[in-house]
Image: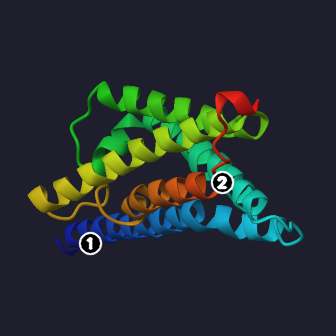
C-alpha cells in the first residue's frame, strides 16, 4: 500500500519538477529574445558615431534573433511537437498548430534574411511579425481573463509577445529615413 502512494508521489513530484523547469526555461528563452538583441546591439555599436546607424544595427539584431531565431525555433516546436505544444497551451490538438508553426517559420525566414535586404523589407518584417506577436499576446491575455492562469498563456512568452512588438516599432521609427519626394531622386 505504501509503495503505491510512494510511486504516485514520485510521479507527481517529477511532473511538478518538469513544470517548474519548463517555466524557468520559458522565462530564460523569453529573456533572451527580449534582451539579448539589445545587449549584442549595444556591444556592436560602441564605436558607431551616427545614432541612426546604431538604431539600425540594433534593429537588425532584433530581426535576426527575436524574429528569425524565435520564429523558426517556435515554429519547429509547433510543427514537430504539436501534442506537447497543445498540452502546454492547454488547447485541443488541431491542424491549426501546424499552420501556426508554418507561419512562425515563414516569419523566421524573413527575419533571418533581413541583413541582406533593404529597409523596406526590414520594416515590413518588423511590422508584420510585431503585429502577429502583439495579437497573439492579446489573445493570451484574453484567455487568462477567461480561464485563469495557464503556463502557455502567462509567463515569459507573454512578456515577449507584448514587449517585442513595441521594441520593433520603436526601432523602425528611430531608424526612419528622411522622407524623399519624387523630385529629389
Q: Nearer the viewer, mark 1 or mark 2?
A: 2
Alpha carbon of mark 1 to alpha carbon of mark 2: how far?
56 Å
Bin the neighbour count of mark 1 within 10 Å (Cα to Cα): few under 14, some 14-19, many 20 and up: few
**Secondary structure category for the residue under label 1:** helix
Residue 20's quadrant in the figure? bottom left
Bin the neighbour count of mark 2 within 10 Å (Cα to Cα): few under 14, some 14-19, many 20 and up: many
The one of 151 and 99 positioned closer to us in this rendering: 99
Q: Is residue 53 left or right of residue 14?
A: right
Q: Quadrant of the N terminus?
A: bottom left
Q: Is residue 56 left or right of residue 66?
A: right
Q: Position of residue 117 (x, y in %)?
A: 74, 33
From this view, report whether residue 60 is shown above or below residue 145.
above
Q: Residue at x 72, y 54 (%)?
A: 56
Numbered mark located on residue 175 in the image: 2
Q: Position of residue 21 (x, y in %)?
A: 45, 68
Residue farthest toward the right in the current orientation of the protein? 47
Residue 126's quadrant in the figure? top right
The one of 5 and 76 positioned closer to us in this rendering: 76
Residue 48's quadrant in the figure? bottom right
**Secondary structure category for the residue under label 2:** loop
The residue where tag 1 is placed is 9
Is there any visible trace of residue 72 in the rendered image? no
The one of 16 and 63 positioned closer to us in this rendering: 63
From this view, report whether residue 107 is shown above or below residue 138.
above
Is there any visible trace of residue 138 in the rendered image? yes
Q: Residue at x 24, y 66 (%)?
A: 8
Amino acid at each position: 500500500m505504501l509503495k503505491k502512494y510512494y510511486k504516485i508521489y514520485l510521479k507527481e513530484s517529477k511532473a511538478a519538477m518538469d513544470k517548474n523547469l519548463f517555466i524557468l526555461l520559458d522565462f530564460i528563452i523569453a529573456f533572451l529574445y527580449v534582451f539579448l538583441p539589445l545587449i549584442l546591439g549595444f556591444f556592436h555599436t560602441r564605436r558607431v558615431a551616427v545614432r541612426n546607424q546604431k538604431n539600425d544595427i540594433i534593429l537588425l539584431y532584433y530581426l535576426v534573433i527575436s524574429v528569425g531565431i524565435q520564429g523558426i525555433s517556435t515554429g519547429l516546436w509547433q510543427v514537430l511537437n504539436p501534442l506537447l505544444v497543445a498540452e502546454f497551451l492547454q488547447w485541443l490538438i488541431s491542424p491549426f498548430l501546424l499552420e501556426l508553426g508554418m507561419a512562425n517559420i515563414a516569419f523566421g525566414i524573413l527575419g533571418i534574411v533581413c541583413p541582406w535586404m533593404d529597409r523596406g523589407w526590414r520594416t515590413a518584417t518588423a511590422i508584420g511579425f510585431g503585429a502577429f506577436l502583439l495579437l497573439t499576446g492579446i489573445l493570451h491575455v484574453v484567455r487568462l481573463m477567461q480561464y485563469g492562469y495557464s503556463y502557455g498563456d502567462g509567463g515569459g512568452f507573454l512578456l515577449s509577445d507584448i514587449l517585442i512588438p513595441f521594441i520593433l516599432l520603436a526601432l523602425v521609427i528611430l531608424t526612419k529615413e528622411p522622407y524623399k519626394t519624387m523630385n529629389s531622386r
